[in-house]
Amino acid sequence: MAARTLSLTPPRRRLAADSRLALLLRSPVALLSALVLIFLLLVAIIGAPLLQDLANTQNLRLRFFRPFSLERGWAYVLGADALGRPMLAQLIVGARTSFLVAGATVALAATIGTTLGMVSGYIGGVVDAALMRISDIIVTVPSLLLALSVLFVLEPSILNLILVLAVARLPIYLRVSRAQTLEIRERVFVEASRALGKGTSSILWRDIRPLVVPTVMTVAMLEIASVMLAAAGLSFLGVGLQRPDVDWGTIVSEGREYLTRAWWATVFPGLAILVTALAANLLSNWMRASGDPLQAAAMGVTASREEAARP
Amino acid sequence: MAADTKVAVTSVLKVEKLTKHFGQVTALNAIDFEVAEGEILAVVGESGSGKSTLARTILRLLDASSGRILYRGKDLLGLTAAEMRATRRHIQMIFQDPYASLHPRRTVFELVSEPWRVHSSVAPRREWPQRVAALLEQVGLPQAYASLYPARLSGGERQRVAIARALALRPDLLILDEPVSALDVSIQAQVIKLLMTLQQEIGFTSIFISHDLALVRLIADKVIVMNRGRIVEQGPTQAIFANPRDDYTRLLLASSPELVGETATKEQEA
Ligand SMILES: Nc1ncnc2c1ncn2[C@@H]1O[C@H](COP(=O)(O)OP(=O)(O)O)[C@@H](O)[C@H]1O
Ligand SMILES: [Mg+2]
């Protein structure tokens, strides 16, 4: 055997994470997006419990207090709404709900959708046909309409909002993971696993899942943006959350009534939604590009060279 | 190694009238053969003649259309899925392309110990490190390779990992589907030599699929010649090579120009 020089590098799992991070540091847009998201998330997690009371403090003397003035303290720097509640504090409290709804919806839909998609793609047959028909039906009904009708009947709570949005977003994960599974299923290492005596569940969990998850993660990041917009849309239409639960969508929808008198009550929460959605979108794009071996090669990574090396 | 020197030979695998259709195509047409204990049975034939299909059907990776596959007297086609999975412990396969047969996200250690995860009675977890070390040694790979991913290995090294994985279960019957044809010519001889050494040490029975007739002549006890899903000729290696009775076999031998020279060089190497 040709003498191979063997550098004792750590296992590639860490190598991949390291070089992915290094790559992120070299991509200013992706880095900025990630920082924005982390910042908003931290503010939501740390700030919301502290500002809960302040956000609900009404002060009619401060109705439509104008933004960009520190005269009333930093909580009022973005102005106040029709009941004199500080905008900044409300936005921070709303951030927690918005992130909670988007995060939980995406996590739920991704977990269930991916599991069903892998099973569907691997087993095929009747199970596959049935799941795909159900998925078709969900896709055909516009998700906003579906959510609208369900929430109209059910009580609009955070839990119901999450459940209904998760059902509406399920097909995306189902399709993505099914398509990937159909391709992976045919690869020889899966046949080799069967030849070892592995059963279906072990093949799905240990062979197929690790290759499907990265793609699903990319989709999930993109979905954070869509779900946040969908949740805001529902709140805007009045079937989303009701006080005392408040998310960015609720704030926009309340502010809308006074748009001409107090633009800040609508524009700031709107901007928060926009910035978050944009950051999630850009990050997802970057994830897709850096996860794709061909594009990654163009970007100068060697992290996924095992796929790149495959015939 | 020759089967005819043994007095009482037990049949490890006996295939009867095995047939496999892919839609209109008959990939296997009433295949009949038998492999005795410790024997190396070579399956030769041009590309597309059904050799891989035969291997996959025996392991029930493909569903047979009809026939019987008797492994030590037990018809594999009659087993339930769970019984078949358990039986695979005794029948292992090495695939043609080591670039495709190893999971890309698994280290060599994980790859080689994977069989014990499936058949947990074979080796308790605390023995895995020593056992993997022993297997790597047996297939001639440095211990440091245990933490590497297949992407870092050459084709020959990957096939050694696949061999170690197959041997982890100490199989009774090993099916090798053109185990070196995807490798560099310069590596092929080393891997074959390794396989032959292991066969002598461990004594597994094997079905060796190949289109390298020079090699087959060197290592096989018996030969099956396949053409378009049929066995056109079978018999002891010497007899087939010395006196091919079927036209197709003669064609195959004639179209292997390197046969004479190759055999000589390989014999020197071995
Ligand atoms: N999964 C499959 N579906 C349809 N036809 C197949 C499949 N696998 C093999 N075949 C066909 O069966 C025949 C035998 O193929 P194979 O067993 O791979 O031949 P070999 O290994 O001898 O080259 C070929 O005609 C091939 O096209
Ligand atoms: Mg083949």
Image (tube, rainbow, N blue to C red):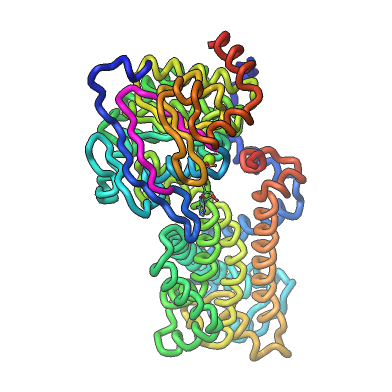
Q: Where does the C terminus of chain A fall, quadrant-wise?
A: top right
On the image, the x and y values in percent for residue B157 come to 56, 25
On the image, the x and y values in percent for residue A204 come to 42, 51
On the image, the x and y values in percent for residue A235 come to 55, 82
User: Observer-nearest residue: A255 or B119?
Assistant: B119
Residue at the image position 33 percent from the left and 18 percent from the top: B4
User: Observer-nearest residue: A232 or A71?
Assistant: A232
| Left or right of B21, for residue A90 | right
- Kindly tell me whether residue A51 is visible in this rendering: no
Query: Which stretch is magenta?
Result: B29-45
Residue at the image position 54 percent from the left and 36 percent from the top: B247
| Left or right of B263, for residue A30 | right
Residue at the image position 62 percent from the left and 75 percent from the top: A87
On the image, the x and y values in percent for residue B242 come to 50, 21
| Left or right of A102, for residue B204 | left
Q: Where does the N terminus of chain A fall, quadrant-wise?
A: top right
Residue A56 is inside the magenta segment: no
